Amino acid sequence: MPPVYDPSNPSSPEERRRSFRLLFLCLMATGIGNSMLFAILPPLARDLGVAEAYVGAIYTISALLFLIMSPVWGALSDRYGRRPLIMFGLYSFALSTLIFAVAALAGQLGWAPPMIAIIGMAAARALFGGLGSATNPAAQAYVADRTAPAERTEALAGLTAAFGLGGVVGPALAAAFVERIGIAPFMVAVAVLVAIAAFFVRLLLPENTPPRRQTRPINPIAQLAFAFDKRVFPFFLYGCGLWLAQAISLQVIGFYVMDRLSLGPAAGLQLAGVALTAGAGALIFAQLVVIPALKASPRALMTTGGILTVIASFQMVFAASYGAIVFGYMLGSFAFGLSRSGFVGGASISVTPEEQGRAAGITTATAGLGFLIAPVSGLWIYQVYGPETPYLLNVALAAAFAVLAAFHPQIRSVTKIAKPAPEPRDPI
């Protein structure tokens, strides 16, 4: 059997705290590596003279592989344990970042034509999508294994906040250091940071319960089909809409700042980095401060997040200044923090302990689907119909998933309120 939460024989609170802190730092490192691309890519694309749609292609293949492989890695973590999959994903992420750095440097220095450089970057992101996607579902399942349902939404919110905190640090570091040392050295430094995180997982992360071993091969189609289980499907559907809106916002913000304010690539990098950092800070505030204070159910978080996303998207449509853009982006990120924690926690509570890896893989896959569709629905309509149109699309998406959260019977049935679990009498 995989490691599950057992009230009569739990891990000690101190052991759980140490483990969760280590996972927090690991996901923060990958968040830094991932979020820096949203600040770096738009100015890099303008510098190389390639269209916005080609930037979208970098995300598309990565997102497709992320969508397909996240449920597989989640199921494999049920079989082989969480720690091996977490390490594998971190090392793969580090390697993909190194390859991306080489491709970017080749394009900037003229060693390769711009389109060859773009293809190299797309290949690097494909490596992340296919292999680096192992970390998140395994880490989420690790936390779910060691928390009771009543505390799980809050615990998973704290874990996913790590990726958001990396989102604060990544654009800020990119804005501070890219002009000084260049894109490639900066990305190499991030790759080293993630590799170090993987080493510490191997050294320090406990996994005391033997994993479940089976000989039956894992079929990616069968794992994706778990998304249509009636317990999971409404959370999966909500997550797809949520991540599509978030992916659109992330992919267009750099271009939006440059075009709305008539800025060049250098100034655009600086101001987009500030906006991304402010948005990530709002997301962290939602997950680490607001959610623990509210003790709200998954449904309440999902509904509130959807309503706030509608307001934030309208704010972006009518933003006439840089300050208004930053405020709209911060509000949208705050809403995303509430919504994401709600649907991830709700899906986890809805399934059995033996299915935590599969559920984590499915909820993680929603990000891949969002980034798969966003280049067409976001960057393409941005290029063809104008900067405001992606945010109008987000208004419609957010309104739809807010209604889903408010009225779907399965989401309404998950009413667990997050509260601290009782301290064990004889921890081991």
Image (cartoon, helix red, strand yellow):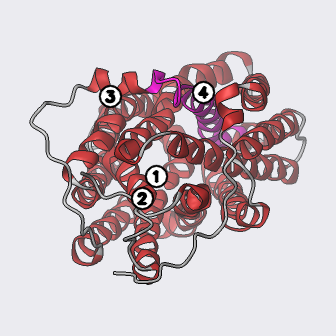
- In the image, residue 11 above or below residue 160: below
Relative to 393, 314 lies left or right: right
In contact (CB < 8 Å): disc 2 and disc 1: yes
Q: In which quarter of the image is residue 219?
A: top left
Say whether disc 3 or disc 1 marks the residue closer to the N-terminus.
1
State the separation of the CA atoms marked 4 and 1.
27 Å
Which residue is more in the foreground, 102 or 203?
Answer: 203
Query: How many numbered discs?
Result: 4
The magenta span reads 227-256
Residue visible at 66% across and 60% down? 277
Q: Is mark 3 on a helix, strand or loop?
A: helix
In the image, which is nearer the foreground, mark 4 or mark 2? Answer: 4
Q: Percent position (x, y) of residue 393?
A: 74, 22
Residues under labels 2 and 1: Cα distance? 6 Å
Distance Cα–Cα, label 2 vs label 3: 24 Å
Circles 3, 1 touching at the beta carbon (< 8 Å)? no
Q: For mark 1, what is the residue?
A: 34
Secondary structure that dominates the magenta span: helix
User: Residue 30 bears which disc, if any?
Assistant: 2
**Residue 254 lies in the magenta-colored region:** yes
> In terms of secondary structure, where does tag 4 sit?
helix
Which residue is label 3 attached to? 223
